[in-house]
């Protein structure tokens, strides 16, 4: 009978007493103490709040089970049936939908509330500390429509996990819920306030409530732009700002809301959706002239000015209130007047220095904008508050070297090192630790630039059971050289090798701090290189040379085959096959203690000595053709491996150019043999370098072939320009037979020469590559007369694509300002590209180019010092943006994007995906 009545899963047996589910310290009691601000039971609720998460809603079957159980409570009212419902709803751990559906179900089933159910629902809501039970109690009370319990239900709404349910009950119980919702909003937290404001947006509200919405909505700290949009709309921000004057509180409210509204990169969010945006911003700027006097004002007005650069031209909402994009210029001018109307430095430094100042972040950002050095003030503030995580993080970036000893002492005196060294092993973690874990990590990172300083901090870091600390300490030691390691640090690192469990840290140790005792020394490894590069036979000339190898790998069209990329000396030059991974790391790392062993010798005394030896040996070869000197030159050149080889070669060329060496009978032959009969790339390069100074036009063909390989291009092109009778023709011949890096280097030089028309035409149409530099694109456009070609009434598609690629190349590289700002014909070229694009722009690459042009023009004022040179103004840029956007929006790109996305070619798929993303199109639609 019991199983039939309560269900087979009911966890209660026999005649045992029913477990007590009513609690003295209930959620309601704690919320009431919070409401009364006595905080007596705060701790219990905070724990409940941390654990609670929204889950899936009740299913129809769940609701049926709950209703059946409620019927038993309503009919019998005994402890067993009540406990059955309590256990059922709490073990489900599913969210009752925060609307009226569950309440409607109770009414539809005609479940009686008296004499038992109403009191049971009050106990569920107000006498339990289980949030699932409280949810159920709230909804059952809502179904009763007994407004006597409404004040107590509002108290429960203080808890984030119950506020939506409280709102649903208020809406269900009360015919005009506005005042009750407002009552709830005034006692709940930030999350609850936003839920209340969302609900109030459905009803007519008076001015007092609107004022409250603006005040509370803007005063919650950083809020998402969608919340800010709701606050601005429901609170009537635009209407409030129409007044001739406003008070300071309303100004700050508007300032903060506008700041949140513009925090979006999408044109479908935030300010873009706010219909009265133009009038609101204009009136805000008008009031800012009276009220802007804080660092926060500078920071947020500057952000608004940046946003307005391209906002007006793109936003449809502006047109709805009778404005056009020209108003943004006026606003930006007025903002600039405000920002330049006073000296902000004192306020900025106060914001940095004083502990009680809450504008620290804004002050730091404004200091960066104004170029104010804040390092002294950050250190002063850190001395006042050494526990502030923001300060330790910032002091790593902003301090003076003379303060490092003070900072080290501050860290040792105030950060709880011992506490974290002794953290239990099971709590070891990458992050998420409360308190000082980030401060300690920042203090460790501070030492990267100060080898040998703060040894105790490094030891603490190495011994910490926090993985984050150990990793940072290892990264600091990697940046130091071993000569700065004390015996204690060496012992600590050795101990880590034996016990370290973190795989990432073990990899750092193996890769960057290998145990040298277990491998050959650097001196031994250097000998191995010398032995491999020059077998000691004394004869280095061979018919199996690099030049002959490239001849064999040349196609009938005069291009190098793909197999030519791997030169025959690769096993010697990249000799790591004979070394262990750790030995390679030892040889190539810069943690050794002497310049003699440093892998990059270009800026060391050793590099200078070796260059001097090469010059001396070359003089001996030129004078007497000494075989021993030839072998010595070859052997030393073979060891000139450096990450900055061009620096060593330049130094060598400068040195030999000052000598008056005889080319015959020995020098030319020796250099030519290095060029044509060596099978080691470094010797070939030094052969090119010698011939550049002492060769003649007879070697140009060999130089052209070598220059087609990326390793020799730079050196060969330089020599051809010096030796060729017609360098433009020779370089053009090379450029037509290479791609990528080789083509970039050759075109860079070719485009700077005096050229015939066919070469200019080729530069325009084919001089660019996917990897081209912006400087090359600028040169190709200028040499090829791009502006004149695009000025025609009609052009063919190949010219359109070439012009589009060149313009994008000028606009997009890491160089700032971009080369396009130097292009004096930039304005007509962009206008004409947009005009011709209406006929020719059809594939995803065309779309990407147009989007990038649009993006560049949005930021055109960044390059203010160069705009006049190319004719750009903000007004012209906005006109171009408007026309570009109109064309993009007028064309249906999705069919061709889908076609490319289905391609077997990975590059086509990537391009289609990127174009879809950049144009803010539906990616799910692309994948269909």
Image (cartoon, rainbow, N blue to C red):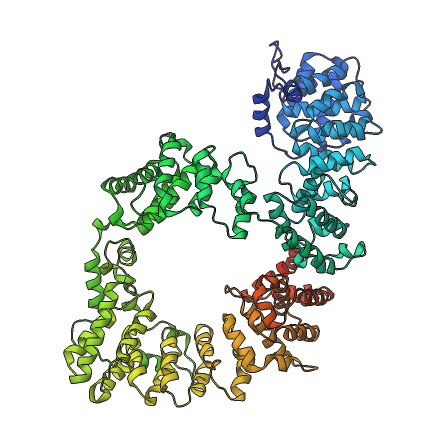
Residue 3 appears in the figure: no
Q: Position of residue 541 (x, y in %)?
A: 22, 80
The one nearer the camera, 279 or 706, is 279
Residue at 50% over, 63% down: 814
For residue 525, say whether it is visible.
yes
Instruction: Examine the rendered structure and indicate whether residue 772 appears above or below residue 410.
Output: below
Seen at 39% across and 44% down, the residue is 445
Q: Nearer the viewer, residue 910 or 638?
A: 638
Residue 228 image offset from top left, x and y in percent: 69, 42
Q: Is residue 610 above or below residue 331?
A: below
Q: Name above or below for residue 72 compared with residue 255.
A: above
Question: Residue 547: percent from the left, percent from the top?
Answer: 32, 80
Residue that extends furthest to the front in the rendered view of this protein: 342
Q: Nearer the viewer, residue 100 or 711?
A: 711
Q: At 30% across and 40% down in the image, what residue appears? A: 455
- Whole-percent x, y for residue 683 in the image: 27, 75
909 displayed left or right of 73: left
Quarter of the view holding residue 206: top right
- On the rendered image, what quadrant is the N terminus found in? top right
In the rendered image, the vertical position of residue 137 relative to residue 94, given as above or below:
above
Total count of labels: 0
Q: Quadrant of residue 621?
A: bottom left
- Locate the C terminus and report the quarter of the image it occupies: bottom right
In-image side of 142 versus 510 (left or right): right
């Amino acid at each position: 009978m019991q199983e039939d009545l309560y269900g087979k899963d009911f966890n209660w047996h026999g005649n045992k007493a029913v477990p007590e589910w009513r609690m003295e310290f209930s959620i309601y009691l704690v919320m009431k103490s919070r409401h009364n601000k006595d905080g007596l039971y705060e701790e219990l609720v905070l724990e409940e709040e941390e654990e609670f998460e929204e889950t899936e809603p009740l299913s129809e079957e769940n609701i049926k089970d709950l209703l059946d159980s409620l019927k038993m409570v309503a009919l019998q009212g005994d402890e067993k049936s009540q406990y059955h419902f309590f256990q059922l709803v709490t073990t489900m751990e599913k969210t009752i939908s925060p609307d009226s559906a569950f309440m409607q179900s109770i009414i539809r089933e005609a479940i009686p509330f008296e004499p038992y159910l109403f009191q049971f629902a009050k106990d569920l809501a107000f006498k339990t500390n289980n949030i699932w039970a409280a949810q159920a109690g709230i909804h059952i009370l809502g179904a009763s429509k007994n407004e006597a319990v409404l004040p107590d239900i509002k108290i429960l709404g203080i808890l984030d996990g119950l506020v939506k349910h409280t709102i649903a009950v208020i809406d269900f119980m009360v015919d005009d819920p506005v005042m009750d919702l407002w009552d709830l909003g005034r006692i709940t937290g930030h999350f609850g306030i936003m839920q209340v404001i969302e609900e109030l947006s459905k009803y007519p509200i008076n001015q007092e409530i609107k004022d409250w919405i603006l005040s509370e909505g803007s005063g919650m700290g950083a809020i998402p732009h969608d919340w800010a949009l709701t606050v601005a709309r429901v609170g009537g921000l635009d209407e409030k700002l129409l007044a001739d004057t406003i008070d300071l509180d309303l100004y700050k409210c508007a300032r903060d809301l506008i700041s949140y509204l513009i925090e979006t990169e999408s044109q479908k969010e935030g300010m873009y959706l706010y219909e009265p945006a133009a009038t609101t911003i204009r009136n805000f700027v008008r009031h800012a002239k009276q009220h802007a006097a804080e660092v926060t004002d500078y920071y947020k007005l500057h952000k608004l000015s940046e946003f307005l650069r391209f906002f007006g031209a793109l936003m449809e909402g502006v047109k709805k209130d009778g404005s056009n994009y020209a108003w943004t210029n006026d606003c930006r001018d007025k903002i600039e007047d405000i920002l330049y109307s006073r000296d902000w430095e004192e306020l900025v430094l106060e914001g940095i220095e004083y502990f009680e100042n809450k504008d620290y972040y804004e002050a730091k950002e404004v200091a960066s904008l104004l170029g104010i050095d804040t390092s002294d003030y950050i250190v002063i503030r850190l001395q006042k508050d050494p526990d502030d995580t923001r300060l330790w993080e910032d002091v790593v970036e902003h301090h003076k070297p003379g303060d490092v000893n003070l900072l080290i002492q501050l860290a040792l005196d105030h950060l709880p090192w011992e506490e974290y060294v002794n953290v239990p092993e099971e709590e070891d973690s990458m992050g998420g630790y409360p308190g000082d874990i980030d401060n300690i990590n920042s203090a460790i990172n501070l030492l990267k630039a100060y080898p040998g300083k703060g040894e105790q901090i490094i030891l603490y870091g190495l011994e910490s059971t926090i993985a984050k600390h150990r990793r940072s300490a290892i990264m600091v030691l990697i940046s130091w050289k071993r000569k700065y390691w004390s015996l204690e640090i060496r012992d600590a690192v050795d101990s880590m090798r034996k016990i370290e469990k973190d795989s990432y840290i073990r990899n750092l140790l193996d890769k960057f701090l290998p145990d040298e005792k277990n491998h050959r020394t650097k001196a031994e490894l250097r000998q191995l290189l010398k032995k491999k590069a020059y077998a000691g036979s004394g004869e280095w000339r061979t018919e199996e040379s690099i030049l002959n190898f490239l001849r064999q790998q040349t196609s009938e069209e005069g291009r190098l085959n793909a197999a030519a990329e791997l030169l025959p000396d690769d096993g010697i030059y990249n000799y790591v096959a004979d070394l262990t991974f750790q030995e390679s790391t030892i040889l190539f790392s810069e943690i050794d203690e002497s310049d003699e062993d440093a892998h990059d010798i270009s800026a060391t005394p050793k590099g200078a000595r070796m260059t001097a030896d090469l010059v001396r040996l070359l003089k001996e070869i030129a004078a007497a053709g000494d075989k021993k000197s030839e072998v010595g030159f070859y052997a030393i050149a073979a060891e000139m491996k450096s990450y900055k080889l061009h620096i060593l070669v330049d130094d060598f060329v400068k040195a030999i150019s000052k000598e008056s060496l005889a080319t015959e009978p020995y020098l030319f032959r020796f250099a030519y043999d290095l060029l044509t009969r060596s099978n080691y790339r470094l010797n070939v390069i030094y052969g090119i370098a010698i011939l550049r100074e002492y060769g003649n036009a007879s070697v140009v063909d060999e130089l052209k072939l070598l220059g087609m390989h990326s390793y020799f291009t730079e050196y060969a092109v330089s020599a051809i320009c010096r030796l060729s009778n017609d360098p433009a023709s020779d370089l053009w011949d090379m450029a037509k037979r290479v791609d990528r890096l080789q083509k970039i280097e050759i075109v860079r030089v070719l485009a700077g020469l005096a050229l015939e028309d066919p070469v200019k035409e080729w530069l325009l149409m084919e001089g660019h590559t996917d990897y081209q530099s912006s400087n090359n694109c600028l040169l190709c456009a200028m040499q090829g007369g791009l502006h004149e070609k695009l000025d025609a009434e009609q052009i063919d598609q190949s010219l359109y694509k070439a012009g589009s690629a060149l313009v994008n190349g000028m606009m997009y590289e890491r160089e700032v300002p971009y080369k396009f700002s130097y292009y004096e014909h930039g304005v007509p070229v962009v206008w004409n590209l947009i005009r011709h694009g209406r006929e020719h722009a059809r594939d995803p690459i065309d779309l990407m180019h147009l989007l990038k042009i649009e993006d560049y023009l949005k930021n055109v004022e960044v390059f203010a010092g160069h705009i006049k040179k190319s004719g750009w103004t903000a007004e012209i840029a906005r006109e171009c943006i408007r026309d570009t956007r109109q064309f993009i929006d007028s064309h249906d790109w999705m069919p061709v994007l889908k076609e490319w996305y289905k391609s077997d070619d990975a590059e086509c798929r990537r391009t289609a995906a990127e174009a879809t993303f950049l144009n803010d199109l539906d990616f799910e639609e692309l994948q269909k």
